[in-house]
Image: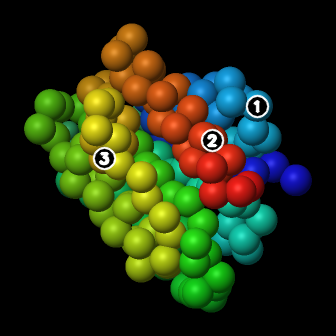
Amino acid sequence: MAKALVIYYSQSGNTKKMAESVVEGIKQEGLEVVLKEAKDTEVSELLKYEAIIIGSPTYYGTMAAEIKKLFDDSVSFHGKLDGKIGAAFASSANIGGGNETTILDILNAMLIHGMIIQGDPQGDHYGPVAIGAPDTRSTRECVRLGTRVAKLVKKLGG
Ligand SMILES: Cc1cc2nc3c(=O)[nH]c(=O)nc-3n(C[C@H](O)[C@H](O)[C@H](O)COP(=O)(O)O)c2cc1C
């Protein structure tokens, strides 16, 4: 069974590229991972994974409706995600365009589910951000998030 699930919504491909880099980081640590678009994700699938990483474009400073819907649908499993590892990443058009508020909104919902969130003292603190298409820096941060989440899964006995 795969240990980590990376879910994303992406209209023009920027968040998708970030998601692929997160997957690369997880694989570098030898952990099994599944990559899915939000529209193809049944909320019941969330129960199968030890780590759930979610990426969204920034829409008016928060997550896109497709990602919010996934969280709203997840109420049927409220309490069942308790203790799973969560993480988030986001893409925006502008510096100061709301990447970090988007990430924090996703992490907020994860915390309400009882999920475990690790910050980053050196890299992008809340989660990787990209302005438009991910550049070398953003791609490195996405890979870094993947490796850090995978290490945490192993540390917590996954
Ligand atoms: C409805 C909508 C709202 C958006 N709101 C913001 C915003 O508040 N701040 C910002 O910087 N970019 C905003 N954008 C731009 C996207 O966040 C940005 O283009 C992102 O890289 C798209 O990611 P994607 O290629 O994965 O779809 C918005 C785009 C759309 C379509």
Task: Establish if 148 lies above or below 70.
Answer: above
Judge depth for marks 1 and 3 and give the one in front. 1
User: Which residue, given by chain and number where applicable, does mark 3 sit on?
Assistant: 126
Compared across the picture, whether 88 is left or right of 63 comes to right
| Amino acid type indicated by mark 2 | Ala
The quadrant where ligand 1 appears is top left
- Near-viewer residue (37 or 115): 115
Q: Residue at x 51, y 58 (%)?
A: 86
Compared across the picture, whether 102 is left or right of 79 comes to left
Measured as percent of width and height from the top left, residue 112 is found at 42, 79
| Amino acid type indicated by mark 3 | Tyr
Q: Residue at x 60, y 28 (%)?
A: 25
- In the rendered image, which quarter is residue 132 located in? top left
User: Which residue, given by chain and number where applicable, does mark 1 sit on?
Assistant: 30
**Looking at the figure, which quarter contains the C terminus?**
bottom right
Contact between labelled residues 2 and 1, with CB atoms less than 8 Å apart: yes
Measured as percent of width and height from the top left, residue 91 is found at 34, 37
Look at the image and tell me whether residue 56 can be seen: no
Measured as percent of width and height from the top left, residue 77 is found at 64, 84
Compared across the picture, whether 51 is left or right of 68 comes to right
**Which SS class for mark 1?**
loop
Q: Give the Cα distance between marks 3 and 2.
A: 16 Å
**Which SS class for mark 3?**
loop
The single residue placed furthest to the top in the displayed view is: 136
Question: For mark 1, does the 10 Å Cα neighbourhood hold few (<14), some (14 to 19), or many (20 or more) residues?
Answer: few
Q: Residue at x 49, y 78 (%)?
A: 113
User: Which residue, given by chain and number where applicable, does mark 2 sit on?
Assistant: 150
